[in-house]
Image (tube, rainbow, N blue to C red):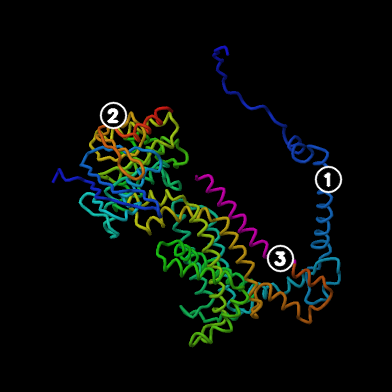
Amino acid sequence: MEPALRPFIEPQSPPLQSSGFIGWLRASFFSSWFNTLVTLALLWVIYQVGGFVINWGIINANWVGDSAKSCPNIDGACWAFITERWRLFVYGLYPKELYWRVNVFYLLGALTIIAFVFSFGPITRKLRLTMFIGFPVAAYIFLVGGVFDLKHISPENFGGLLLTLVIATVGIFGSIPLGLILALGRTSDLKVISKVCTYFIEFWRGVPHIAVIVMFVALLPIFIPDGNKIDIVVRAFIAFAAFNSAYMAEVFRGGLQSIPSGQFEASKAIGLSYWKMMGYIILPQAIRNSVPALVNTCISIFKETTIVLLIGFSDFLGIIQLSLEDPKWLGPPHIFSSAYVFAAIIYFTFTYGMSKYSLRLENRSNVAQ
Amino acid sequence: MPDEPVIIFDKVNKWFGDFHVLRDIDLDVSRGEKIVICGPSGSGKSTLIRCINRLEEHQKGKIIVDGIELTDDLKNIDSIRSEVGMVFQSFNLFPHISVLENLVIGQHLVRRMPKADAEEVAMTYLERVKIADQADKFPGQLSGGQQQRVAIARSLCMKPRIMLFDEVTSALDPEMVKEVLDVMIDLAREGMTMLVVTHEMGFAREVADRVMFMDEGQIIEENKPGPFFDAPRSDRAKLFLSQILRQ
């Protein structure tokens, strides 16, 4: 081999790729005959489906009216059923003159979401913590009342979207702290605590949710003296929070396991106590790593609220089903399908929002690392 | 009692399961002494220094650090950990907070210093390890050598009397080893008591008062660095040195 000294090469800008929108279009959708074929086929499907949706949902739809007769066009949706009943769907059986209290609940819920979605500079963290603790408390005060001159309203009057959101709130806001405690317990060095938490989690995960709900509602009064005095809705809430906390616990345990042992060692080496190590070093990282699974669980909690149908509660889906049985609205099946499409749209809106939020969180934590 | 050893190992034994990882370790370290521990991997050298701040528990024998015996008493462990700083092979900086916050968090939470004061201390140490301009970055944005210097500064912020270094240059690219060793040499000159697990012979020759050669959980040979590296007495040390020199 001849020894050689090669000339130094200065950095250059990368070669230009396809130019502008047309170039992007060609590269993305028409790069080969197969790709072109797939694109055309999909366009045809979108055209057909889109046309049907627009015809059925908008052009041929029946918008107003007060009975099945108002929806003569069976090739279109029967939104009249929704527009006539929306109050019932949104407020359930809550007394009409106290609708404002439900509205306050919705408003606070929206504010809580805003607090978590947007950043508010240095106060962001405190604000979020305040909302996370404050929202359930305020929700209880306004919805149930019985304090500050607010008339007591039994949770049995909750229904529709209100009940769905209340159960989801109980499920999410209850199971996150409970799940965190269980996860810490399960990973604890103290054998007794670890075993108790492990069996608690395994029990709630292993029993069908329907069985749990029925058990709490029907059997609790037998096991606990004065169990009858616990409101049936509250019993369902407890059951709902309990089995969801088991899933949350496993989500957080996964996050805890993703933290390398070096983080624990470094925390101990600078003298942090267990709780300070967990609170300032381990959990902030573990929770961040748990976000995708956490949101996944929140979405399934939200959808699973419909389980209360089985014990006779009228949540959002339940109240729609109940309304469909009203003789006034008995009629052609398009009323039926319109009602369920509407329910699907509402559920999807909430869960899609959560999913988008989790993607944002992931992107943001990628930037921070 | 200035002559009282600051670390005493008295017949210390430890097992990982059935594996006898530390066997009858006897060791006295005086204040200000610099000890380099070397030996093949699995010889127990990391375990030995990790026993000093109780990241590992010993099962037999006695360890006394700064007059406090290491027992299961949590109070003892906490007070010893605040006297002993440790730097790890894999840096172990806290990735979710900035470099400055990495240095502040221990002072603020353990020493209960107000944040502003802690930040001031942190900046002086960051300047000492020549990295003050990176204070607001996150650890992941720094090179390995920079991260390790931050890790040293994080330990020093706690004003430890003893520093433990566990193969701190092994995970670094070759061109970054020197910047970390320079910081350690400075520290040694200031009189810090140091126990250093390393194979950096240049460093050992320059700063070590004693070299301990370990193999199979025991201290096989102990000598001043010059004679140890030039003329090891035990066969195991001869073999070990010939292996690391061949690289």
Label 1 sits on what residue type? Leu
Start-end of magenta stretch:
A341-369
Of residues A142 and B130, the one nearer the viewer is B130
Q: Among all residues in the image, which is located at the extreme top? A: A2
Q: Which chain does the residue under circle 3 lie in?
A: A
Label 2 sits on what residue type? Glu
Q: Which mark is residue A40?
A: 1
Residue A142 in view of the camera: yes
Identity of the residue drawn at 63% across and 69% down: A304
Q: Which mark is residue A235?
A: none
Q: Could you tell me what secondary structure mostly forms the magenta stretch?
A: helix
Q: Secondary structure at mark 1?
A: helix
Q: Secondary structure at mark 2?
A: helix
Identity of the residue drawn at 46% across and 79% down: A147
Q: Nearer the viewer, mark 2 or mark 1?
A: 2
Residue assigned mark 2: B206
Are there few (<14), some (14-19), or many (20+) residues within 10 Å of tag 2?
A: few
Percent coordinates x, y for residue B118 in the rendering: 31, 46
Q: Among all residues in the image, which is located at the extreme front? A: B235
Q: Are marks 3 and 1 on the same chain?
A: yes
Q: Is residue A272 left or right of residue B79?
A: right
Q: Nearer the viewer, mark 3 or mark 2?
A: 2
Identity of the residue drawn at 35% across and 43% down: B45
The answer for how far apart the CA atoms under marks 2 and 1 are is 74 Å
Residue assigned mark 3: A344
Q: Secondary structure at mark 3?
A: helix
Q: Is residue A29 left or right of residue B247?
A: right
Of residues A261 and B200, the one nearer the viewer is B200
Q: Is residue A9 left or right of residue B237?
A: right
Please check the rendered image and state whether residue A367 is part of the magenta-colored stretch, yes or no.
Answer: yes
Percent coordinates x, y for residue B236 in the rendering: 35, 35
Percent coordinates x, y for residue B60 in the rendering: 29, 55
